[in-house]
């Protein structure tokens, strides 16, 4: 009889142990990552990107350390993605992402223009992808292939530093352009410049109107 009681007690202990084991929760919840600051940011070309970081928490492990992958090149326009990852003790992984867009501050000036004045022609201008507030011309002076000319914009002031266009025009010559201008509105700017060709200086004036 005593032996039967001992056997019954052992069986009860095993059953109780199995019951507790069956009720034990499995950790399947991923950590939660919260971005500090906005999930989407815009910064100026050649500006500074400040990493705001994240906070990572897990319902069982509490605060966690996160890692970051990706980078932001402030010297090249484009959209960059930063991914933050945190892993808890059970191996569950949580992620979050932030996008950072690097833009030229005068990107809105890019586009097709009607140029009128000393010469009438159409041109396409593009904001630089590597130098902030710089605007490149597609065929300045209506010279095909004259893509080396650019202006720098500072507020409403425009500067065309002395720039050489090698062997453009017909017949081809090395031509040097230099001048200044003014941003009149969001769609119009003027430019007064000199064109030096084979030692001969010509004064020219153009109004650029965005189409």
Image: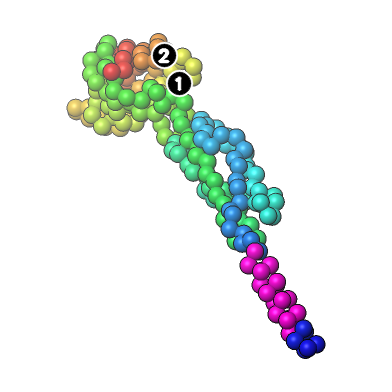
Q: Which residue is mark 2?
A: 183
User: Between 112 and 82, which is closer to the camera in this rendering?
Assistant: 82
* Side of 18 relative to 208 (left or right): right
Residue 211 appearing in the image: yes
What crowding class fits label 2: few (fewer than 14 Cα within 10 Å), some (14-19), or many (20 or more)?
A: some
Judge whether residue 190 is colored magenta. Answer: no
Assign a secondary structure to mark 2: strand
Give the quadrant of residue 35: top right
Farthest residue in the front direction? Answer: 1
Marks 2 and 1, Cα distance to the nearest angstrom? 8 Å
Farthest residue in the right direction? Answer: 2
User: Between 209 and 38, which is closer to the camera in this rendering?
Assistant: 38
Numbered circles on residues, count: 2
Q: In which quadrant is the C terminus drawn?
A: top left
User: Between 38 and 14, which is closer to the camera in this rendering?
Assistant: 14
* Side of 52 relative to 102 (left or right): right
Image point 43% across, 17% down: which residue? 158
Q: Which residue is mark 1?
A: 153
Q: Which region of the structure is painted magenta?
A: 7-23
Give the quadrant of residue 166: top left
Q: Position of residue 25 (x, y in %)?
A: 64, 61
* Side of 174 relative to 109 (left or right): left
Mark 2 in CB contact with mark 1 (< 8 angstroms): yes
Q: Looking at the magenta stretch, what is its main secondary structure?
A: helix
4 in relation to 154, above or below: below
């Amino acid at each position: 009889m005593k032996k039967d009681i001992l056997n019954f007690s052992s069986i009860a202990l095993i059953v109780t142990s199995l019951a507790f084991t069956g009720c034990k929760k499995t950790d399947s919840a991923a950590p939660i990552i919260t971005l500090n600051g906005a999930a989407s940011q815009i910064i100026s070309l050649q500006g500074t990107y400040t990493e705001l970081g994240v906070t990572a928490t897990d319902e069982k492990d509490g605060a966690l350390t996160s890692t970051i992958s990706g980078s932001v090149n402030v010297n090249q326009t484009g959209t960059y993605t930063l991914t933050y990852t945190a892993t808890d003790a059970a191996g569950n992984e949580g992620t979050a992402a932030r996008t950072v867009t690097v833009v030229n501050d005068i990107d809105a000036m890019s586009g097709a223009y009607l140029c009128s004045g000393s010469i009438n022609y159409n041109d396409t201008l593009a904001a630089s992808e590597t130098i902030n507030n710089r605007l490149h011309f597609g065929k300045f002076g209506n010279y095909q292939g004259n893509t080396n000319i650019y202006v720098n914009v500072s507020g409403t002031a425009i500067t065309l530093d002395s720039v050489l266009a090698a062997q453009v025009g017909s017949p081809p010559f090395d031509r040097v352009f230099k001048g200044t201008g003014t941003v009149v509105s969001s769609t119009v700017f003027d430019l007064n410049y000199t064109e030096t060709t084979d030692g001969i200086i010509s004064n020219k004036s153009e109004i650029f109107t965005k189409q």
